[in-house]
Image (cartoon, rainbow, N blue to C red):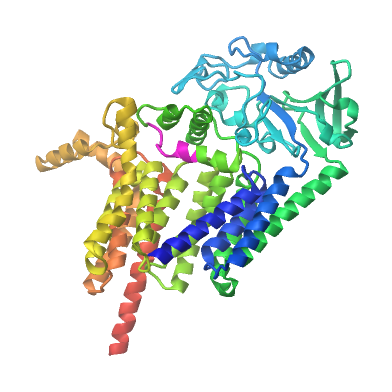
Amino acid sequence: MYIINYKYLFKALLSLSVVAVIGLPINTFWHFTLLVASLVSIVALPVANVTSRKALISIAILATAMILNYSLPRAAIEEGHNLFLADEVRSNILPDNLPLPVYARMKQQFDQAYPLNKRCDPHKAGCWRSPIWAESNWGKKESIKTAYAQSLDSIFRKAKYSRVVDQIEFSDLDDLRAGFVNELSNSWWGDDSDIKRASMPYFVMYELNERIVDSLMCWTGEVMWENAQGSFDTFYNERLACRAITSADIGKRIYGLRVNPEHPLAMQLKPNTKLKFSNLARESCTLIAVIVSLILMLRWSAWRTILFPALCIATTAAFILLFVPGLTHGYTIFVGGDDGLTHEGLGREVLRHLMTGDISNALRGEEDVFYMMPGMRYFRALGFVVFGETNFGYMAMMLILPLVVFSVARLLLPRSWSFAVLALTSSLIFQFITSANYGYADPMGYVFFLIAIWLTLSPSSNLITRWLGFIFLALSVFVRPNLAIAAVLLILVHFWQSTRNISLRDALLSSSGFGLILLVPIHNYVFGHRFVPLTSAASIPENLKAAPLTYIHAITEVVTGHWSGANMDVIKEHLLKYRSSWEILCIVMVLAAWTYRKRVHAPMTNGMLLVTVGMFLPFLFYSASGRYHLLAWLFAIIVGVGYIFLIRTSLHNTAESR
């Protein structure tokens, strides 16, 4: 046990050291790639025999890299950005807090692009002028409450305006990574609004400093450059053009305007020679420190163990780059009024409370009783801490998805058949990744559940890994409560297997990790003063289309001969919506029955079947769009192929015995 704990602790410390050297937030693609490559190596490779000499060298190199990282010159440009709306219905403070010429110019452009007589009706909920956004379900949230929107990139670098940046390079609102695009107060949607969220008007401001003198500021579109007299000169470039930053510009501001969607804005800073050298030296030191530490701390003679996970993750990354590039760069502008934006907006509020020391409201998560998926807001907040305003947190989870699917398949199948499962489920994996790009909670909950299955049911698991597995199981329900039935059935399968393989005491200790889910009803009782096991959304008619009581009444109707009763009609209409799911489940059940008839001993496959049935059971009662079925379909394929393999093996053995 001591050796196991030592290895886990050592790998955890090494991972934290890599993060410390790279520096938080990890919000550039290069740093994210370095982090992923390092973590894959740390997880896949065994720990080396670390001598005191190796440890001292590694610590010295990592410490040197961190010192250089923080001491080498940076551009450290103060950036301010915000949404720009000028309308009497939606009050804001911009007129009193922006330079008068800058505000006047943006107001002129706004009125030209969005004439008053053509603006949307504020009485329509989807309109950007609607008061619903000033008084949302999560309290009063003004759209523009400060001159410059707060950026969550500024957690570790205190900013004068929105954030401090070392590079400037963006060509659209996604590239700018401005968090205001996904605030709860800006969640207008659809055809009701003349201003579309994907092209919402905004501005960005940079305060020039002495470190970027002799650099070039390049742009297309319109900028307003502060002059020596304190007024602003306006420049418009149809094509990319540059202007040198001189000592006379120190302390001056540049405003980039993108109010009219027909006049796009792109800006880029070409740093001076000193900054170029400093950036190159910093990144080189970081790379060298990470590589040397990994070489010293890990046993690379076992390099074959890293080949498959590295290849799998690299292939997934290439797939995402080609087909879902939104996860790899910029900051996704989520669909207004959709679940993805709501999770994101709630996560932003949770982190703001933490930043101000308001622990109580951070734990409350903007809801007295959870209605939205409970855990997603907290994971979003954690993602901002580690990765800033990027999509890298969710991308990291999607990178390991195929690997985890393969690992779960290996519980039932040989290696070659598991590759076949990976091919059969590739379209589902693509839908997982697409859903993640929309910010939905489902893919995260599903990945947690897959990890839980792998850790708890693996024959090579021990007490610690099983306990971690049940922690992940609790997290899966925390993020996606519709997995609760399947989670309970997995616990039963675990106890069933424990009577054969491990002691009941170990089974109880490992499954105690699932107790983490009790935090949800505790939250609801403490803040909402009522007992709600998971979410209040579970009981509303819009979701609960066929309640258990409806089935009881339908059975009564059938018994009394009323086959076309009102309750039966409700159930038939509901079940027919998900006919394809029931057909998939029936095929798997037929395969299971066949193996039972052949008296094939398959405890693992039968246990997985029970868990799979648990994933389908909520569809008996609840309305569920396609993304809610993905994990059930995936498990049905894995278990179905598992039974096919058992049948094939049984037939082969029978033929050989003859």
Image position, residue 387 (x, y; %): 59, 43
The N terminus: image quadrant: bottom left
User: Closest to the observer: 464 or 371?
Assistant: 464
User: Closest to the observer: 298 or 101?
Assistant: 298
Question: Furthest-bottom residue in view?
Answer: 658
Q: Is residue 610 left or right of residue 87?
A: left
Residue 375 in magenta? Answer: yes
Q: Is residue 235 above or below residue 269?
A: above
Q: Residue at horizontal 29%, vertical 84%?
A: 654
Image position, residue 589 (x, y; %): 28, 61
Q: Is residue 350 above or below residue 87?
A: below
Q: Is residue 473 left or right of residue 148?
A: left
Name the image quarter holding residue 4: bottom left
Q: Is residue 68 left or right of residue 41?
A: right
Q: Is residue 287 visible?
A: yes
Image position, residue 595 (x, y; %): 27, 70
Q: Is residue 184 above or below residue 515?
A: above
Question: Furthest-top residue in view?
Answer: 88
Q: Residue at horizontal 37%, vertical 32%?
A: 370
Image position, residue 23 (x, y; %): 64, 46
Residue 563 in magenta? Answer: no
State the extent of the magenta-drawn residues as a range.
371-380
The C terminus: image quadrant: bottom left
Q: Is residue 35 left or right of residue 361?
A: right
Question: Furthest-left residue in view?
Answer: 560
Q: Residue at horizontal 42%, vertical 51%?
A: 448
Q: How many marks?
A: 0
Name the image quarter holding residue 45: bottom right
Q: Is residue 591 visible?
A: no
